[in-house]
Amino acid sequence: MDDGFSAQPVEIAKLAGASIKAADTIDDLRSRTRADLVVPAAAFGDTAQGGPAHRAHEAAAEAAEAAVTGLAAMYERDGDRLYGAAFSYQQGDHDTAALYRKVGPAGAPA
């Protein structure tokens, strides 16, 4: 019975590669722009609110870096899983082809 599902291992592997590339791009951009988020405390002035504003900025920058790092890690994990799925589908296709060669499509020995 045909359930309408068809997996294309090559296409899944292409998607996996795109996901890994996205992870690398995100991580590269994060690394290159990290220094831009560092603002010295003196830039916030010498008022009573300068210190708290600086600390709030540092906390926001750390949270942003953690979020972007997590996003890159998610894309990398997804890419790894997609590669695994592509391999599994391809292996299943090979196993099915070997079975057909051995038994034949009607179940009779080939």
Image: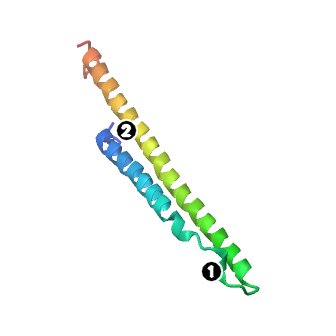
Q: Where is residue 6 shown, x and y percent of the image? A: 32, 42
Q: Which residue is drawn at 28% across and 15% down?
A: 102
Q: Which residue is drawn at 32% across and 46% down?
A: 14
Q: Nearer the viewer, residue 30 or 76?
A: 30
Please name the colour scheme applied to the rendered image: rainbow
Q: Do callouts 1 and 2 mark residues in contact (Cβ within 8 Å)?
A: no
Q: Which of marks 1 and 2 is in front?
A: 1
Q: Residue furthest top?
A: 109
Quadrant in which the N terminus appears: top left
Which numbered tag is attached to residue 107?
A: none
Taking the image as drawn, is residue 82 in sight?
yes
Q: Where is residue 59 shown, x and y percent of the image? A: 66, 69
Q: What element carries label 2?
A: helix
Quadrant in which the C terminus appears: top left
Up the image or down, 2 lies above or below 37; here it is above
Q: Which residue lies furthest to the left in this view?
A: 110
Q: Where is residue 76 shown, x and y percent of the image? A: 47, 48
Residue 58 quadrant: bottom right
Up the image or down, 13 lies above or below 101; here it is below
Residue 65 vs residue 96: left or right? right
Residue 39 quadrant: bottom right
Q: Which amino acid does label 2 sit on?
A: Ala
Q: What residue type is labelled 1?
A: Ala
Q: Using the numbered discs, state the Cα–Cα distance from disc 1 to disc 2 in whole angstroms.
A: 52 Å
Q: Around disc 1, counting alpha carbons within 10 Å, would you say few (fewer than 14), some (14 to 19), or many (20 or more)?
A: few
Which numbered tag is attached to residue 86?
A: 2
From the image, tell me which residue sits under label 1. Answer: 43
Residue 100 vs residue 20: left or right? left
Taking the image as drawn, is residue 4 in sight?
no
